[in-house]
Image (cartoon, grey):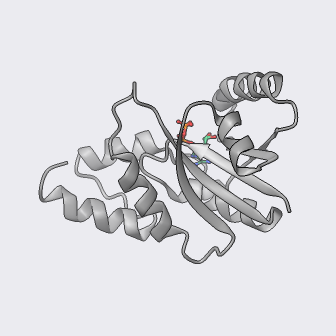
Amino acid sequence: MKIAIYPGSFDPVTKGHIDILKTASELFDKVIIAVAHNSAKHGFLPVEKRVELIKESVKSMPNVEVDAFEGLTINYAKKVGAEILIRGLRAVSDFEYEMQLSQANSALASEIKTIFLTTKPKYNFISSSTIKEIYLNNGDISKFVPEPVYEYLKKERKYGI
Ligand code: ADP
Protein backbone atom coordinates (compact mmCIF):
# COMPACT_ATOMS: atom_id res chain seq x y z
CA MET A 1 0.00 0.00 0.00
CA LYS A 2 1.45 3.35 -1.08
CA ILE A 3 1.01 5.97 1.62
CA ALA A 4 1.79 9.63 0.95
CA ILE A 5 1.88 12.56 3.32
CA TYR A 6 1.13 16.14 2.36
CA PRO A 7 2.67 18.31 5.08
CA GLY A 8 2.28 22.06 5.47
CA SER A 9 0.93 24.91 7.54
CA PHE A 10 -2.54 25.04 5.94
CA ASP A 11 -3.28 28.26 7.79
CA PRO A 12 -5.94 28.18 6.43
CA VAL A 13 -6.39 25.37 3.90
CA THR A 14 -7.16 26.75 0.41
CA LYS A 15 -8.67 25.51 -2.83
CA GLY A 16 -5.08 25.19 -4.09
CA HIS A 17 -4.26 22.71 -1.31
CA ILE A 18 -7.50 20.79 -1.94
CA ASP A 19 -6.71 20.54 -5.65
CA ILE A 20 -3.25 19.10 -4.91
CA LEU A 21 -4.83 16.69 -2.46
CA LYS A 22 -7.40 15.51 -5.00
CA THR A 23 -4.65 14.65 -7.50
CA ALA A 24 -2.64 12.91 -4.77
CA SER A 25 -5.65 10.90 -3.65
CA GLU A 26 -5.97 9.55 -7.21
CA LEU A 27 -2.30 8.57 -7.32
CA PHE A 28 -1.84 6.90 -3.92
CA ASP A 29 -3.73 4.39 -1.79
CA LYS A 30 -3.79 6.68 1.21
CA VAL A 31 -2.89 10.35 1.63
CA ILE A 32 -2.40 11.96 5.02
CA ILE A 33 -2.60 15.73 5.03
CA ALA A 34 -0.54 16.71 8.05
CA VAL A 35 -0.58 20.12 9.71
CA ALA A 36 2.87 21.04 10.96
CA HIS A 37 2.83 22.41 14.46
CA ASN A 38 5.47 25.10 14.76
CA SER A 39 5.63 26.36 18.34
CA ALA A 40 7.98 29.20 17.31
CA LYS A 41 5.47 30.57 14.78
CA HIS A 42 2.28 32.22 15.93
CA GLY A 43 -0.37 31.11 13.48
CA PHE A 44 -3.54 32.73 12.20
CA LEU A 45 -5.73 29.80 13.27
CA PRO A 46 -4.92 27.28 16.02
CA VAL A 47 -3.67 23.92 14.71
CA GLU A 48 -6.77 22.11 16.04
CA LYS A 49 -9.05 24.45 14.11
CA ARG A 50 -6.99 23.99 10.92
CA VAL A 51 -7.32 20.21 11.29
CA GLU A 52 -11.06 20.48 11.89
CA LEU A 53 -11.60 22.69 8.82
CA ILE A 54 -9.53 20.37 6.62
CA LYS A 55 -11.55 17.37 7.84
CA GLU A 56 -14.77 19.10 6.82
CA SER A 57 -13.25 20.05 3.45
CA VAL A 58 -12.07 16.54 2.45
CA LYS A 59 -15.20 14.58 3.32
CA SER A 60 -15.64 13.55 -0.34
CA MET A 61 -12.17 11.93 -0.46
CA PRO A 62 -12.37 8.60 1.39
CA ASN A 63 -8.66 7.77 1.20
CA VAL A 64 -7.56 11.08 2.73
CA GLU A 65 -6.80 11.34 6.45
CA VAL A 66 -6.06 14.51 8.43
CA ASP A 67 -3.51 14.76 11.22
CA ALA A 68 -1.13 17.19 12.96
CA PHE A 69 2.50 16.66 13.89
CA GLU A 70 5.46 18.29 15.57
CA GLY A 71 9.13 17.90 14.72
CA LEU A 72 10.81 16.70 11.56
CA THR A 73 8.54 15.78 8.66
CA ILE A 74 10.61 12.70 7.80
CA ASN A 75 10.17 11.35 11.33
CA TYR A 76 6.45 11.79 11.01
CA ALA A 77 6.52 10.08 7.58
CA LYS A 78 8.37 7.09 9.06
CA LYS A 79 5.94 6.91 11.98
CA VAL A 80 2.92 6.62 9.68
CA GLY A 81 4.66 4.36 7.14
CA ALA A 82 4.68 6.89 4.28
CA GLU A 83 7.21 6.56 1.45
CA ILE A 84 6.05 9.65 -0.41
CA LEU A 85 6.15 13.28 0.63
CA ILE A 86 4.02 15.62 -1.46
CA ARG A 87 4.71 19.30 -1.90
CA GLY A 88 3.09 21.79 -4.25
CA LEU A 89 4.73 24.15 -6.68
CA ARG A 90 3.18 27.41 -7.78
CA ALA A 91 5.89 29.49 -9.37
CA VAL A 92 9.61 29.48 -9.95
CA SER A 93 9.87 31.38 -6.68
CA ASP A 94 8.74 28.25 -4.77
CA PHE A 95 11.32 26.11 -6.52
CA GLU A 96 14.52 27.03 -4.71
CA TYR A 97 13.09 26.60 -1.23
CA GLU A 98 11.24 23.40 -2.10
CA MET A 99 14.30 21.93 -3.81
CA GLN A 100 16.45 22.65 -0.76
CA LEU A 101 13.87 21.15 1.56
CA SER A 102 13.52 17.98 -0.52
CA GLN A 103 17.28 17.55 -0.72
CA ALA A 104 17.67 18.00 3.02
CA ASN A 105 14.91 15.46 3.62
CA SER A 106 16.50 13.06 1.16
CA ALA A 107 19.88 13.39 2.90
CA LEU A 108 18.19 12.56 6.21
CA ALA A 109 15.97 9.74 4.92
CA SER A 110 16.67 8.61 1.36
CA GLU A 111 13.80 6.09 1.45
CA ILE A 112 11.27 8.91 1.52
CA LYS A 113 10.74 10.46 -1.90
CA THR A 114 9.45 13.98 -2.46
CA ILE A 115 7.01 14.46 -5.31
CA PHE A 116 5.94 17.87 -6.58
CA LEU A 117 2.43 18.49 -7.84
CA THR A 118 0.83 21.54 -9.42
CA THR A 119 -2.74 22.77 -9.38
CA LYS A 120 -5.17 23.74 -12.09
CA PRO A 121 -4.14 27.19 -13.42
CA LYS A 122 -7.12 28.89 -11.75
CA TYR A 123 -5.82 27.88 -8.30
CA ASN A 124 -2.18 28.45 -9.00
CA PHE A 125 -1.77 31.89 -7.46
CA ILE A 126 -3.64 31.10 -4.25
CA SER A 127 -1.67 31.11 -1.02
CA SER A 128 -2.76 31.10 2.62
CA SER A 129 -0.96 34.40 3.19
CA THR A 130 -2.82 36.12 0.30
CA ILE A 131 -6.09 34.85 1.71
CA LYS A 132 -5.28 36.13 5.19
CA GLU A 133 -4.44 39.52 3.71
CA ILE A 134 -7.71 39.70 1.75
CA TYR A 135 -9.74 38.50 4.75
CA LEU A 136 -8.14 40.90 7.20
CA ASN A 137 -8.90 43.75 4.80
CA ASN A 138 -12.55 42.70 4.53
CA GLY A 139 -12.27 41.26 1.02
CA ASP A 140 -14.26 38.34 -0.39
CA ILE A 141 -12.35 35.05 -0.05
CA SER A 142 -15.18 32.76 -1.17
CA LYS A 143 -13.47 31.88 -4.48
CA PHE A 144 -10.23 30.84 -2.82
CA VAL A 145 -11.14 28.65 0.15
CA PRO A 146 -13.31 25.58 0.63
CA GLU A 147 -16.85 26.21 1.92
CA PRO A 148 -16.17 25.19 5.57
CA VAL A 149 -13.28 27.68 5.81
CA TYR A 150 -15.38 30.42 4.26
CA GLU A 151 -18.31 29.77 6.61
CA TYR A 152 -16.07 29.61 9.69
CA LEU A 153 -14.23 32.83 8.88
CA LYS A 154 -17.45 34.62 8.01
CA LYS A 155 -18.83 33.70 11.43
CA GLU A 156 -15.58 34.63 13.19
CA ARG A 157 -15.40 38.02 11.50
CA LYS A 158 -18.24 39.16 13.73
CA TYR A 159 -16.10 38.45 16.76
CA GLY A 160 -13.04 40.01 15.17
CA ILE A 161 -10.31 37.42 14.51
P1 ADP B 1 4.33 25.59 4.17
O1 ADP B 1 4.30 26.60 5.29
O2 ADP B 1 4.90 24.28 4.55
O3 ADP B 1 4.86 26.11 2.86
P2 ADP B 1 1.63 25.81 3.08
O4 ADP B 1 0.37 25.45 3.82
O5 ADP B 1 1.80 27.23 2.71
O6 ADP B 1 2.79 25.24 3.98
O7 ADP B 1 1.73 24.93 1.77
C1 ADP B 1 1.85 23.54 1.78
C2 ADP B 1 2.33 23.07 0.43
O8 ADP B 1 1.33 23.35 -0.57
C3 ADP B 1 3.60 23.73 -0.07
O9 ADP B 1 4.37 22.77 -0.76
C4 ADP B 1 3.11 24.81 -1.02
O10 ADP B 1 4.06 25.11 -2.02
C5 ADP B 1 1.91 24.11 -1.61
N1 ADP B 1 0.88 25.02 -2.12
C6 ADP B 1 0.19 25.94 -1.44
N2 ADP B 1 -0.68 26.60 -2.23
C7 ADP B 1 -0.51 26.08 -3.48
C8 ADP B 1 -1.10 26.36 -4.77
N3 ADP B 1 -2.02 27.30 -4.93
N4 ADP B 1 -0.65 25.62 -5.82
C9 ADP B 1 0.30 24.69 -5.66
N5 ADP B 1 0.90 24.38 -4.48
C10 ADP B 1 0.49 25.07 -3.41
Q: Is residue 21 above or below residue 110?
A: below
In depth, the one of 151 and 81 nearer the eye is: 81
- In the picture as drawn, the residue positioned furthest to the front comes out as 79
Residue 145 pos. (x, y %): 44, 60
Q: Is residue 74 visible?
A: yes
- Residue nearest the observer in this picture, 50 or 133: 50
Left-right relation of 130 to 135: right
In the picture shown, does residue 151 fall above or below 93?
below
| Rendered residue at 20%/48% (across/down) | 161
Residue depicted at 54% across the width and 43% down the height: 69
Is 87 left or right of 142, judged from the image as shown?
right
125 w.r.t. 153: above or below: above
What residue is at 32 percent from the left and 46 percent from the top?
134
Q: Name the quadrant containing residue 79.
A: top right
Quadrant (top left, top right, bottom left, bottom right) of the N terminus: bottom right
Image position, residue 140 (x, y; %): 31, 58
For residue 154, what is the image quadrant? bottom left
Residue at (41, 53) in percent of width and height: 50
The total of numbered circles placed on residues is 0
- Quadrant of picture, ligand 1: top right
The x, y position of residue 65, in whole percent, is: 61, 63
Relative image position of residue 139 (x, y in whole percent) = 28, 53
| Residue extending furthest toward the left | 159
Q: Nearer the viewer, residue 53 or 154?
A: 53
In the rendered image, is residue 145 in sight?
no
Q: Is residue 113 left or right of residue 128?
A: right
